[in-house]
Image (cartoon, grey):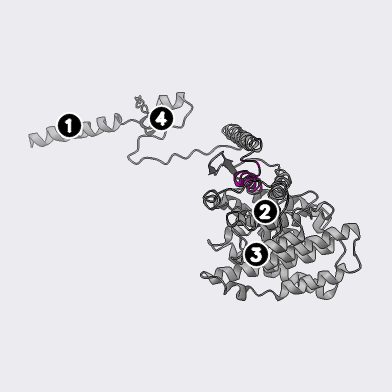
């Protein structure tokens, strides 16, 4: 009995002392001696920190910052420009070396810069290695991606042209990537400012015909639909110059008929696996290309209002939204839907706030999913267009933009192959 009266208080005192002497979690993290003040230690208060307390469970270290209180953005932006400068200097040095000028490494470096600008990611390209750094570029101004296209095409010409380079297996993906970005970039540019010479329609047809994989690398866009996008771009450019304007409406109708006759299910059956996802992607892009054709060709007065065309436009608008809703729920293909989403936002004017809210929300989600600013840029462009009174396609894109899904290059395939030096004149196929 006496023992019980003595031990009980001693145990209680020991427990209290142990709890009182426990360091707060912030002092433990910083390896400091806590002053054990309660409810918050003085060390944390003096450092301007919220004391996490003395609980038995380690708290999560989440600190919510008020808008405008972010203090790391300028630091990251400075690092971005520093690395970008190193890459540019490296590429410039290569242009001054006879054994590297026009080589595979230089060509790949410029293509990598193009991809970085398109996707708003940062790609570091050194003299001997290409390293992808997933740094999120917090910039609201689109980069001048056309300069990269011009530089790439200049190097291609110096290497003998598209037909000559197409013989090199290790550069095949570079050429297809170049063609894809050239064609897609023209869709979100004003008709008066389309670049139809880099590459030419003949070169586009050649590269796609030579493609052995029956698909555009890193994308889910069927090659035959990419050809029709290029044809639509050509009609838009011709409409601004009145060249062959009498035949343009008939050509436009034929293009739309070919797009409608494309069978996503037949195309998907050519794939070795995941055919249901290929079929869904084909359905999405088929509707998106149709909507792009109708909206953009109406904008340049090649196509005019008619009951049948209005019905087709309404059907494709609703179909594209439903297909995108399904595709964006699939982890396999959701990150490849930036261009179709942009087309839906620009081509579905007059469909009401529900459609616009759908597009804006999905672009927000995509930006978080892929870690890129490009979807947010598309959202900003579309919201400005929605606030305007003009509903034409060209009014949505008063200057050149490009909205392509993020992808990367298989650089190992390029670097493991021997380089072929630059040649002065073109060669026949």
Residue sitting at x 61%, y 67%? 214
Which image quadrant: the N terminus? top left
Mark whose residue sits in front, 2 or 3: 3
User: Spatial distance from mark 2 to mark 3, Cα to Cα?
Assistant: 14 Å
Quadrant in the picture for residue 175: bottom right
How many labels sit on residues? 4
Magenta extent: 100-118
Q: Secondary structure at mark 1?
A: helix
Q: Secondary structure at mark 2?
A: helix
Q: Is residue 353 visible?
A: no
Determine which residue is flagged by label 2. 178
Residue sitting at x 65%, y 75%? 263
User: Does residue 365 appear left or right of residue 426 in this picture?
Assistant: left
Sequence-wise first label, 2 or 4: 4
**Labels 1 and 4 touching (C-beta < 8 A):** no
User: Spatial distance from mark 1 to mark 4, Cα to Cα?
Assistant: 27 Å
Q: Residues within 10 Å of mark 2 (few under 14, many from 20)?
A: many
Sequence-wise first label, 3 or 1: 1
Measured as percent of width and height from the top left, residue 313 is found at 77, 69
Residue sitting at x 60%, y 69%? 280
Determine which residue is flagged by label 3. 210
User: Does residue 240 appear left or right of residue 355 in this picture?
Assistant: right
Q: Secondary structure at mark 3?
A: helix
**Labels 2 and 3 touching (C-beta < 8 A):** no
User: Does residue 241 appear left or right of residue 262 in this picture?
Assistant: right
Q: Residues within 10 Å of mark 1 (few under 14, many from 20)?
A: few
Quadrant in the picture for residue 227: bottom right
Q: Is residue 37 above or below residue 133?
A: above
Rendered image: mark on residue 40: 4
User: Spatial distance from mark 3 to mark 1, Cα to Cα?
Assistant: 87 Å
Does the magenta-highlighted stretch encompass residue 252?
A: no
Determine which residue is flagged by label 1. 10
């Amino acid at each position: 009995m006496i023992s019980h009266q003595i031990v009980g208080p001693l145990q209680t005192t020991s427990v209290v002392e142990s709890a009182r002497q426990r360091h707060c979690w912030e002092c433990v993290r910083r390896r400091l001696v806590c002053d054990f003040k309660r409810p918050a230690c003085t060390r944390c208060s003096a450092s301007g920190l919220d004391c996490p307390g003395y609980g038995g469970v380690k708290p999560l270290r989440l600190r919510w910052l008020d808008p405008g209180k972010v203090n790391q953005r300028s630091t990251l932006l400075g690092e971005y420009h520093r690395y970008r400068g190193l890459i540019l200097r490296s590429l410039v040095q290569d242009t001054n070396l006879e054994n590297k000028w026009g080589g595979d490494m230089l060509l790949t470096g410029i293509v990598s810069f193009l991809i970085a600008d398109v996707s708003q990611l940062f790609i570091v390209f050194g003299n001997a290695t290409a390293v992808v750094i997933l740094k999120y570029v917090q910039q609201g101004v689109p980069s001048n991606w056309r300069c990269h296209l011009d530089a790439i095409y200049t190097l291609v010409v110096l290497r003998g042209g598209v037909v000559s380079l197409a013989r090199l297996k290790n550069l095949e993906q570079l050429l297809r990537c170049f063609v894809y970005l050239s064609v897609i970039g023209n869709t979100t540019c004003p008709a008066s400012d389309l670049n139809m010479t880099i590459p030419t329609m003949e070169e586009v047809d050649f590269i796609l015909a030579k493609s052995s994989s029956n698909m555009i690398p890193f994308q889910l866009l069927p090659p035959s639909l990419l050809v029709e996008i290029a044809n639509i771009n050509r009609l838009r450019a011709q409409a601004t110059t009145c060249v062959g304007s009498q035949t343009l409406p008939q050509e436009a109708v034929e293009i739309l008929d070919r797009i409608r006759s494309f069978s996503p299910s037949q195309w998907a059956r050519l794939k070795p696996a995941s055919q249901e996802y290929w079929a869904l992607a084909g359905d999405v892009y088929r509707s998106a290309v149709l909507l792009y054709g109708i909206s953009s060709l109406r904008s340049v007065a090649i196509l005019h209002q008619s009951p049948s065309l209005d019905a087709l436009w309404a059907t494709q608008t609703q179909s594209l939204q439903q297909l995108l809703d399904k595709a964006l729920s699939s982890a396999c293909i959701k990150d490849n839907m930036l261009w179709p989403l942009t087309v839906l936002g620009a081509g579905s004017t007059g469909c009401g706030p529900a459609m616009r809210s759908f597009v804006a929300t999905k672009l927000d989600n995509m930006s978080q999913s892929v870690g890129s600013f490009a979807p947010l840029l598309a959202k900003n462009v579309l919201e400005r267009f929605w606030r305007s009174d003009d509903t034409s396609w060209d009014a949505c894109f008063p200057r050149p933009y490009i909205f392509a899904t993020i992808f990367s290059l298989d650089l190992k395939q390029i670097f493991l192959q021997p380089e072929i030096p630059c040649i002065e004149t073109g060669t026949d196929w």
